[in-house]
Amino acid sequence: MDTADPIRDWARARSRDLASELATDPYVRSARLLGYSLRSQVRGFFHDPRHPAARRLLRHWFDLAFEAGADRAEDMAVEIEHDWSHGDERALAGAWRALRKEFGHVVAAADAAATGAPPGTPDDPDRAAARRVAFDRWLDDQST
């Protein structure tokens, strides 16, 4: 019995890479060092979806929703939060949860924009480009 799940594996690998990249971001390091609560992270550090760190987290959430679809994205997002909160990335886990709560409708937008390619092709260049365009459109809508 094959238990491989290409979308879940892809999401977890991208989450680890993102956490590693954001570990050196001064904004994220400040949130981590200051031990901000979930509410503070939303209202202060990660409230503006145009901020680079928040934008990267939102783009990751959007990509996850785009690839997995709304029916699976939330469960995988909870797994990512769990992984981050039980590792050294509690600030990211809190920001991730907060941004998902505040901008959760991104799942529906991503799901509607999905191209319908099979799950084994999440990093196909055309799909990545389609995700970027759809995310930028969505983010522009949030900024108005």
Image (spheres, rainbow, N blue to C red):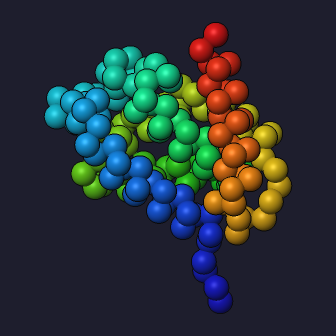
Percent across and percent down for residue 121 are 71, 65
Percent across and percent down for residue 37 are 28, 28
Percent across and percent down for residue 51 are 43, 24
Residue 83 to residue 109: above or below: below
In depth, the one of 117 and 112 nearer the eye is 117
Number of marks: 0
**Left or right: where does residue 11 sit relative to residue 68?**
left
Q: Residue at x 72, y 52 (%)?
A: 127
Q: Quadrant of residue 119?
A: bottom right
Whether residue 90 is visible, yes or no, is no
Q: Residue at x 53, y 49 (%)?
A: 77
Residue at the far right in the pictured view: 116
- For the N terminus, which image quadrant? bottom right
- For the C terminus, which image quadrant? top right
Percent across and percent down for residue 48 are 46, 19
Q: Quadrant of residue 33?
A: top left
Q: Quadrant of residue 98?
A: top left
Residue 76 to residue 46: above or below: below
Q: Residue at x 69, y 46 (%)?
A: 129
Residue at the far bottom in the pictured view: 1
